[in-house]
Amino acid sequence: MLRQFSMVLMSCAVVALIGFTGCGKTKTPAKTGDGDGHAHNHPEKGPHGGRVAELGKDHKYHAELKDDDKTGLVSIYIVDGDLKKDVLIEATELTFNVTVKGKPEFFKFAAVDAKDGKASRFDSTDKRLFEIIEGEIDEKAKGQLTIMIDGQSRVARFKSFEHDHEEGDDHDDHKDEPKK
């Protein structure tokens, strides 16, 4: 009887241990910048070399945020779900909401090469926004873009602005350069 009880107790312990720890075959989702927690099969960078965040949860559209170290220009591109083609949306301006040190700030992006009120690229030359994205003001800053596509409101969340540099560019050589 004691032996049977020990076997039942051991079996329950094994089942509980597997239930709590899993079987070890879980997949780690790919990071895309949107922090939504489900797996993606797309690259870390968009077709223009910027950070990517999904617009909505249906994988149809993405927002790509790209900053140019040389010019200080910050661009937002609207791209398809496969991160291959730019997508025209009905907008001549976008507003990007950035949380800096816990407080919201809003930045306007103007459409580039808009045709019939539609564009896929939007630019900002705001120096403060560039400095935020570079991590010079708040390394924990995050951003959110809310836009309408085909009558549906879509949100892209950039959980961080971790800055990737071109190979060989560690920014140490920029410290003594004058700000533009």
Image (cartoon, grey):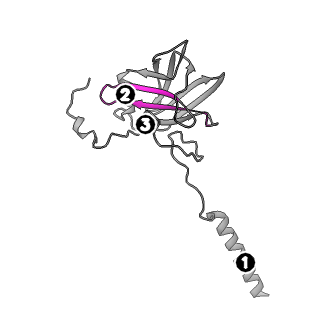
Residue 58, position as x, y percentages in the image: 64, 36
- Residue 175, picture quadrant: top left
User: Marks 3 and 1, how far apart in space?
Assistant: 51 Å
In the picture, measured across the screen, residue 20 lies left or right of residue 106, that is right
Question: Going 45% across and 36% down the picture, which residue do you hit?
Answer: 51
Q: Is residue 48 above or below residue 113?
A: below
For the residue carrying disc 1, how many other residues have a C-alpha within 10 Å: few (<14), some (14-19), or many (20+)? Answer: few
The quadrant of the picture occupied by the C terminus is top left
For the residue carrying disc 2, how many other residues have a C-alpha within 10 Å: few (<14), some (14-19), or many (20+)? Answer: many
Residue 9, position as x, y percentages in the image: 72, 77
User: Marks 2 and 3, how far apart in space?
Assistant: 11 Å
Nearer the observer: mark 3 or 1; the answer is 3
Reading the image, the residue beneath label 3 is 161
Of residue 10 and residue 148, the one placed in the foreground of this image is: 148
Of the two numbered discs 1 and 2 on the same chain, state the one appearing first in sequence. 1
For the residue carrying disc 3, how many other residues have a C-alpha within 10 Å: few (<14), some (14-19), or many (20+)? Answer: some
Looking at the rendering, the stretch of residues picked out in magenta corresponds to: 59-78
Of the two numbered discs 2 and 3 on the same chain, state the one appearing first in sequence. 2
In the picture, measured across the screen, residue 91 lies left or right of residue 124, that is right
Reading the image, the residue beneath label 1 is 9
Instruction: Indicate the amino acid at tag 1.
Output: Leu
Reading the image, the residue beneath label 2 is 130
- Residue farthest toward the right in the current orientation of the protein: 1
Of residue 62 and residue 105, the one placed in the foreground of this image is: 62
Instruction: Indicate the amino acid at tag 2.
Output: Phe
- Residue 70, picture quadrant: top left
The quadrant of the picture occupied by the N terminus is bottom right
User: Marks 1 and 2, how far apart in space?
Assistant: 61 Å
